[in-house]
């Protein structure tokens, strides 16, 4: 029988007879230590695996990758040009003015009208010119009458001179009488000669008055278009000091383009070179050939420009005065040749041999020497070293955002 003592605090205490049913105090601690050791080992293994994975991911994603920006070698047409600005003007125009004074009585045309040579354009009040013509005619008639009288006197004086010469030869009159008739003849002859000269002057005055009367009717000197009118009906014109301009007629069937070429480019421009231009608001391309290069330059904003001129037919009147033209003077051109973007060759000029980087199909880069032909602003002809569809590296972009030009051939890969 088991004996149990009750402690003062009410807890039971086993006797010596019950010690076999109580576990030894050290066994739970040893078991817990083993479990803890195995857990630590597994934790270290897991940490090593995770660390290795993280390191691998960091190494893979942290390494710079290179993206190549390339230009494709293509077949096409290319031209080298000098680009300049120009102004469209009529090749021929005439300022029509007044050659006589008076009030502008009527104006027969308006701006934009097409006129033909000798067509009546305007009339000036003919009152003054008509009065002047009447006075000139009267003076001429007076001179004509006076000369008729003097011519009759000359005939009489001649007859008296001849008769007295005969009488003097027969010694019937004195030498004094003979000399008087001779003198009378000479005076009559001089008076007739003087009046003849005055008549010429009067005739010239009459002709001038007739011309001035004709000038009151203003006609077109050329066939063309009325492009401007300076004076309106009712205004008074004073042609005594300077001929006032009434209107301007321009031949719009052919235009001329005044092109300003800088002194840096003028040495490459020659007479006879092909040239073309466009104007604002039109998709048409106008073609011509350089006709003239003016030798005297013009200074604009401290830059020296030379005027280069060329004609353009304008039968459909699509070109107007003062249009702004973007002009391209063709220096050289080639068709169906290999081309590459100028970004791939940098500042290389025509005829230069340079090295470029070619991206091959396997992703590798090949450094190759090429030769440049005709070069424009956006493309250049490749005369040697490249084939169609090959890719030329323009620049490379790394994954960290760095950009390097492919023209820097000294970098290491």
Image (cartoon, rainbow, N blue to C red):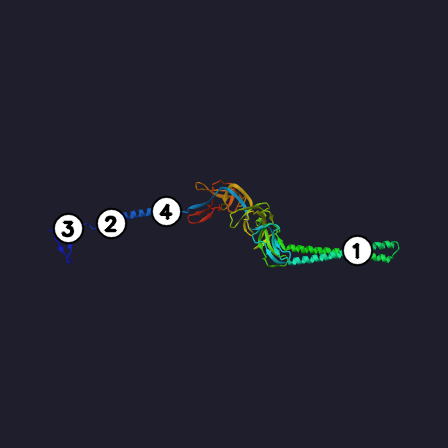
Quarter of the view holding residue 174: bottom right
Q: Earlier in the sequence, mark 1 or mark 4?
A: 4
Quarter of the view holding residue 102: bottom right
Few, some or many residues within 10 Å of mark 3 (<14, 14–19, 20+):
few
| Residue 32, numbered circle | 2
For the residues labelled 1 and 2, the Cα–Cα distance comes to 172 Å
Q: Earlier in the sequence, mark 4 or mark 2?
A: 2
Position above or below: 360 against 124? above
Q: Nearer the viewer, mark 2 or mark 3?
A: 2
Instruction: Quickly name the residue at label 3.
Output: 18
* Residue 357 pos. (x, y %): 48, 43
Q: Nearer the viewer, mark 4 or mark 3?
A: 4
Quadrant location of the C terminus in the rendered image: top left
* Residue 258 pos. (x, y %): 58, 50
Q: Earlier in the sequence, mark 4 or mark 3?
A: 3
Element at label 4: helix
Element at label 1: helix
Instruction: Quickly name the residue at label 1.
Output: 154
Which is nearer the eye, 239 or 131? 131
Asked whether the viewer can see residue 339, the reply is yes
Instruction: Quickly name the residue at label 4.
Output: 57
Q: Earlier in the sequence, mark 2 or mark 3?
A: 3
Q: Earlier in the sequence, mark 1 or mark 3?
A: 3
């Amino acid at each position: 029988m088991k004996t149990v003592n009750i402690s003062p605090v009410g807890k039971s205490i086993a006797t010596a007879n019950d010690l076999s049913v109580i576990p030894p105090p050290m066994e739970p601690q040893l078991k817990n230590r083993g479990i803890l050791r195995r857990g630590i080992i597994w934790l270290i293994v897991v940490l090593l695996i995770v660390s290795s994975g993280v390191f691998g991911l960091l190494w893979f994603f942290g390494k710079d990758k290179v993206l190549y920006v390339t230009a494709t070698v293509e077949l096409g047409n290319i031209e080298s040009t000098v680009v300049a600005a120009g102004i469209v003007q009529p090749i021929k125009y005439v300022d029509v003015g007044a050659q006589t004074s008076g009030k502008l009585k009527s104006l027969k045309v308006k701006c934009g009208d097409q006129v033909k040579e000798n067509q009546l354009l305007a009339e000036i009040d003919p009152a003054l010119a008509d009065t002047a013509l009447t006075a000139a005619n009267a003076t001429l008639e007076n001179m004509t009458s006076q000369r008729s009288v003097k011519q009759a006197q000359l005939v009489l004086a001649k007859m008296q001179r001849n008769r007295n010469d005969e009488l003097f030869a027969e010694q019937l009159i004195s030498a004094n009488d003979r000399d008087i008739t001779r003198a009378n003849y000479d005076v009559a002859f001089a008076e007739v000669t003087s009046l003849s000269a005055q008549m010429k002057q009067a005739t010239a005055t009459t002709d001038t008055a007739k011309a001035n009367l004709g000038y009151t009717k203003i006609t077109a000197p050329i066939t063309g278009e009325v492009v401007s009118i300076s004076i309106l009906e009712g205004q008074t014109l004073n042609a005594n000091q300077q001929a006032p301009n009434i209107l301007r007629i321009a031949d719009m069937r052919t235009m001329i383009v005044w092109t300003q070429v800088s002194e840096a480019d003028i040495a490459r421009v020659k007479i006879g070179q092909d040239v073309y231009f466009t104007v604002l608001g039109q998709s048409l391309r106008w073609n011509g050939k350089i006709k003239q290069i003016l030798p005297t330059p013009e200074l604009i904003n401290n830059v020296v420009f030379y005027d280069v001129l060329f004609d353009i037919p304008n039968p459909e009147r699509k070109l107007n005065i003062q249009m702004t033209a973007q002009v391209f003077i063709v220096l050289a051109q080639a068709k169906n040749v290999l081309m590459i973007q100028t970004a791939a060759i940098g500042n290389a000029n025509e005829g230069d041999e340079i090295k470029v980087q070619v991206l091959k199909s396997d992703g590798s880069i090949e450094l190759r020497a090429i030769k440049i032909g005709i070069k424009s602003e956006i493309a250049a002809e490749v005369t040697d070293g490249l084939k169609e569809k090959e890719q030329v590296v323009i620049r490379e972009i790394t994954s960290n955002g760095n950009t390097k030009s492919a023209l820097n051939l000294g970098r290491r890969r």
